[in-house]
Image (cartoon, rainbow, N blue to C red):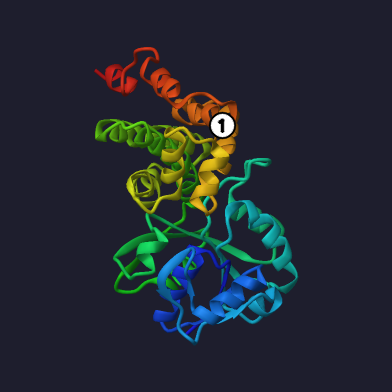
Amino acid sequence: MAKVSIIGAGSWGIALAAVLEKNGHEVAVWSAFEEEIQMLQRDREHKKKLPGVCLKEGIQLTADLEQAVCGKDLLVLAVPSVYVRSTAKSMKPYVKEQTLIVNVAKGIEEQTLMSLTDIISEEIPQAKVAVLSGPSHAEEVGRGLPTTCVAGAKRKEDAEYVQNIFMNDVFRIYTSPDMLGIELGGALKNVIALAAGMADGLGYGDNTKAALITRGIAEIGRLALAMGAKYETISGLTGIGDLIVTCASRHSRNRKAGMLIGQGKSMEEAMAEVHMVVEGVYSAKAAIGLAEKYQIPMPIIEEVNEVLFAGKPVKEAVQELMLRDKKAEHEKLWENL
């Protein structure tokens, strides 16, 4: 049995707390909001963010960060990506040397273009850092539906430790050393999912969705490989797997926000209606920053940025994607003839 704290009481944090309690670990959940902790203590359920998933009485709930962090074997950082740096900074005084922190948020910091695990390492240099990601909507994980994820770490023993802590008969965990690929897949698929949702909002069909998913993974792959990530990661669970579920699922907040934008709502109106953080909006500018830095063409992500931040009509963005210059799907196939 391990002592584990979930830092963040959103839907994903609550779902993972339920998984870890089922696995026999001593679990605590922290929120920055005292009223949220009081609500969870009273109801043992987050009715707004994850209705139907009950937290067992043995799960400790606290708004005291020092209490949540001190004396734990594993810390799971489950706050939205935009709060990872500030939360890590607040955690630093309480984190012991060589404590393992697992990031489960998905995003790239807009100002620095840093991955979230790099941010954690920068803010808490005494800690070891890992990542857990994959096609894993909280609504299904919390209900115990079969799900697979990948634990990434620089050291194999750290990845295997995370694997052993989380894995059970319905939550299967693989390991990988490619932390960069895992995090890029998790962050950038949210931007493509916004595009998929916009297409749904316009009333387009399965053909359009398939094209966006396929060309979207091509964009993600080009950038990821240029940055040093591995092809196997992009073609695996945290690449194409996460992209498929986020573009197609009714649980996807990024797809839902995109759909609302496709139906004519502004970005601000869509985000307000979703009621949760829409990570793709925050990752979109960072994705363009990375594309420019590594000189990688990313036309879908460019058009999403135009819609979100320049007021471009969604229909016009789709039309421009369809009317781009003629090209081969894979130029190298012609070169190799």
Query: Residue 219: which quarter of the image?
Result: top left
The quarter of the displayed image where residue 112 is located? top right
Q: What quarter of the picture does the C terminus occupy? A: top left
Question: Looking at the image, which residue sits at the far top?
Answer: 325
User: Residue shown at 52%/52% (left/top)?
Assistant: 106
Q: Amino acid at mark 1?
A: Ile
Spot occupied by residue 277 in the image (x, y as percentages of width and height): 55, 52
Along the horizontal axis of the image, is 102 left or right of 139?
Answer: right
Q: Is residue 30 visible?
A: no
Looking at the image, which residue is at 30% across and 66% down? 145
Q: Answer above or below: position of 99 versus 3.
A: above
Q: Nearer the viewer, residue 180 or 143?
A: 143
Residue 197: give x, y in percent of width and height. Answer: 39, 39
Q: Tell me the element at label 1.
A: helix
Q: Who is closer to the viewer here, 160 or 30?
A: 30
**Farthest right residue in view:** 93
The answer to whether residue 155 shows anywhere in this view is yes
Residue at 56 percent of width and 81 percent of height: 41
Q: Position of residue 236 (x, y in %)?
A: 34, 49
Q: x, y (%) of residue 181?
A: 47, 46
Q: Which residue is mark 1?
A: 288
Binning the other alpha carbons within 10 Å of mark 1 as few (below 14), some (14 to 19) or many (20 upward) gives many
**How many circles with numbers are drawn on the protein?**
1
Considering depth in this image, is 186 or 249 the residue closer to the camera?
249
Q: Is residue 97 above or below residue 215?
A: below
